[in-house]
Image: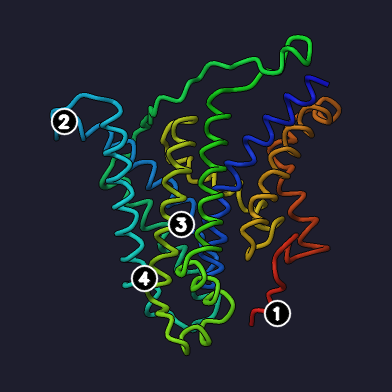
Amino acid sequence: MGFFLETLFGGLMVGMLYALIALGFVLIFKASGVFNFAQGAMVLFAALAMARFAEWVPVWSGIDNPWFANIAAFVLAGALMFALAWAVERLVLRHLVNQDGATLLMATLGIAYFLDGLGQTIFGSNIYKIDIGMPKDPIFAFDTVFQGGILLNKEDLIAAVIAAALVVLLSLFFQKTGTGRALRAVADDHQAAQSVGIPLARIWVTVWCVAGLVALVAGMIWGSKLGVQFSLATVALRALPVVILGGLTSVPGAILGGLIIGVGEKLSEVYLGPFVGGGIEIWFAYVLALVFLLFRPQGLFGEKIIDRV
């Protein structure tokens, strides 16, 4: 029982990180109807900015303090992601209002390649590290309940708590604030929202800013775990099955989908892997997403696309 719970908790913690990345897809799709293929590039760009600013801030300021360097790097990287959101709306989205989905999809692909090139130009193409002080040592929990306790990774636990806190804050933002309600109105009907005075351009900038902040937090966490390298952009591909499972238009769906994928990967690898030679964790999420596409393409909580047209 203890080993099962250990695997389950490990899957839940990884699932929260998947859900965090998936939120970037969902937020932009809800507000603009754009499936943002640039989300992975945004995660990488934000992580590169965080890593490099953390190196440069002590040199610029003369203050050699890791906490100061990380906080300043986070603020600077966040400002850069907000500037990027403004530029995307002003230079790209503003000129593609009411275009078909294929055109918008190609636009996000262009943004992705642009960010990849811009990231290498500004920050370099080496492997960098993000050290935000998260402990690497495992801990034993519930040792009074189970013999030997349950082995948990401190870094994964803290990362999951950070991801969960951000998810809760975003949910409150959408439900309780005027801007959040405006975002939901735009998601329901662009033209109706504009007819009652909701500025579409400002809403798009806001949602891309929020998605940029989500990308920054996700990049910071994954960069701390894996190092900042250009393969980090592929982490976003792990979130694609999450949004398919939960639904492209549902924030709760992104959360639940991430948890299901994370737990499913870990349990299938541990309990089914020995019978099929391992490697289930690599393809499990995509097979599950394919099943949903065949039988419930809108996901658990998503709307049918035909209802949005």
What is the distance, in whole Å, between disc 3 and disc 2 at their CAs?
30 Å
- Dividing the picture into quadrants, the one containing residue 133 is top left
Q: What residue type is disc 4 on?
A: Glu
**Mark 1 lies on residue:** 306
Q: Is residue 217 above or below residue 132?
A: below
Is residue 259 found left or right of 136 in the rendered image?
right
Q: Position of residue 58 (x, y in %)?
A: 19, 30
Q: Residues within 10 Å of mark 3 (few under 14, many from 20)?
A: many
Q: Nearer the viewer, mark 4 or mark 3?
A: 3
**Mark 3 lies on residue:** 211
Q: Is residue 215 above or below residue 38?
A: above
Residues 270 and 259: in front is 259
**Mark 2 lies on residue:** 59
Quadrant including the C terminus: bottom right
What is the distance, in whole Å, between disc 2 and disc 4 at their CAs?
33 Å
**Mark 4 lies on residue:** 89
Q: What residue type is disc 3 on?
A: Ala
Q: Position of residue 173 (x, y in %)?
A: 50, 59
Toward the bottom, the furthest residue is: 195
Q: Secondary structure at mark 3?
A: helix
User: Which comes sooner in the sequence, label 1 or label 4?
Assistant: 4
